Image (cartoon, rainbow, N blue to C red):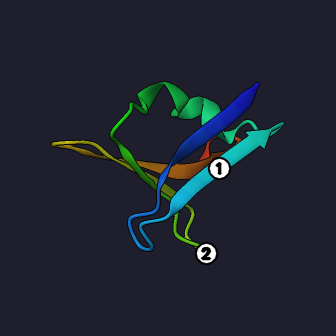
Amino acid sequence: MLFDLSGVSPITNTPSRYRDQGEVWYVYFHDKTSIGDTVIKHKGELKFYIHKKDTILVFPFECKGEIYE
């Protein structure tokens, strides 16, 4: 399954794209993203954020039933 996000970096205001094929971590939230959302993953942090118009969704890293923060 191919996971493909494209948009504009809120920091640099330049086009940005993330593509991944083979990893399975995105299956937990790929159906939660919509056009207009801001997706944020900070380097060194195990959480993934989806900023929607009125909500922020936070996805911690989970492996074998254990949640890592």
Residue 13: percent from the left, percent from the top?
Answer: 41, 67
Residue 26: percent from the left, percent from the top?
Answer: 62, 37
Residue 34: percent from the left, percent from the top?
Answer: 39, 30
Which residue is at the front of the view, 15 or 5? 15
Note whether residue 67 is visible. Answer: no
Which residue is at the front of the view, 69 or 43? 43
Q: Amino acid at mark 2?
A: Gly
**What numbered label is drawn on residue 18?**
1
Note whether residue 40 is visible. Answer: yes
Question: Could you tell whether 10 is left or right of 4 in the image?
Answer: left
From this view, report whether residue 40 is shown above or below residue 20. below
Which quarter of the rendered picture does the N terminus lie within? top right
Residue under the image location 75 percent in, 42 percent down:
20
Question: Could you tell whether 8 is left or right of 36 in the image?
Answer: right
SS state under label 1: strand
Nearest to N terminus: mark 1 or mark 2: 1
From this view, report whether residue 68 is shown above or below residue 42. above
* Outermost residue to the front: 14
Residue 14: percent from the left, percent from the top?
Answer: 49, 64
Residue under the image location 41 percent in, 73 percent down:
11
Q: Which residue is mark 2?
A: 44
